[in-house]
Image (cartoon, grey):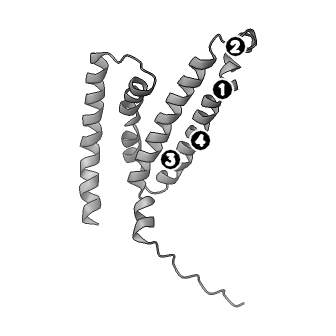
Amino acid sequence: MIDAPEAPPRVRSPSQAWALNPYLLILVAALLGTAGEVLLAKGSKLIAGTSATHAALGWFAPLLSLWTWTGILSYISSLLVWLYVLKFVPLSIAFPLINVVQVLVPAAAHIFLHEAVPVRLWAGIGLVFVGILVIARPLMQAEEKL
């Protein structure tokens, strides 16, 4: 039996390698997840109590909003990026980094939905952010050595 010749390894251009960097993609997944949260909230708030039909639909009424469906698509996109990341980064490292959403969601809710964010919450967000930096800094230094 004759073996088929092996395909040459795919060589990625520097721009492709940069765009597929799993650590950058963790941030992309976090941004998509944050966008999903904001869009779902906006869709839910726009539909709340707008008509008798919406009231009759109860919990399903937000599904009538384009904002809600855009948020769902954002969540699905975030999930797909996350699955790609997990092929390359151990969960014990990736999970703490993806928790940057704990910082991004309240900030985005404040900016885009004009929600009030109490000072204590901002302090907690600051602590979470410091924790993320503590985890990320050694990873960035190790990445530079490669």
Query: As shown in the figure, which amino acid type bears the numbered disc 2?
Result: Gly
Mark in the foreground, 3 or 2: 2
Instruction: Identify which residue is drawn at 49% across, 56% down.
Output: 87
Residue 144 figure quarter? bottom left
Q: Measure how far apart labels 1 and 3 are at the Cα level.
A: 26 Å
CB atoms of marks 3 and 2 within 8 Å: no
Going from N to C along the chain, the mark reached first, 3 or 2, is: 2
Q: Measure how far apart labels 4 and 1 are at the Cα level.
A: 17 Å
Going from N to C along the chain, the mark reached first, 2 or 4, is: 2
Question: Is residue 129 something that shows in the picture?
Answer: yes
- Indicate whether 127 appears above or below 98: above
Q: Which mark is residue 65?
A: 1
Q: Measure how far apart labels 3 and 4 are at the Cα level.
A: 10 Å
* Residue 106 drawn at (x, y percent): 39, 26
Count residues near mark 1 (Cα–Cα under 10 Å), then give few for <14, some for 14-19, many for 20+.
Answer: some
Count residues near mark 4 (Cα–Cα under 10 Å), then give few for <14, some for 14-19, many for 20+.
Answer: some
On the image, numbered disc 2 is attached to which residue? 58
Query: As shown in the figure, which amino acid type bears the numbered disc 3?
Result: Trp
CB atoms of marks 3 and 4 within 8 Å: no
Q: Say which quadrant the C terminus sits in.
A: bottom left
The local secondary structure at tag 4 comes to helix
CB atoms of marks 1 and 3 within 8 Å: no
Nearest the eye: 139 or 129: 129
Q: Which mark is residue 82?
A: 3
Q: Which mark is residue 26?
A: none
On the image, numbered disc 4 is attached to which residue? 76
Nearest the eye: 47 or 84: 47
The local secondary structure at tag 3 comes to helix
Nearest the eye: 142 or 121: 121
Nearest the eye: 12 or 88: 12
Going from N to C along the chain, the mark reached first, 1 or 3, is: 1
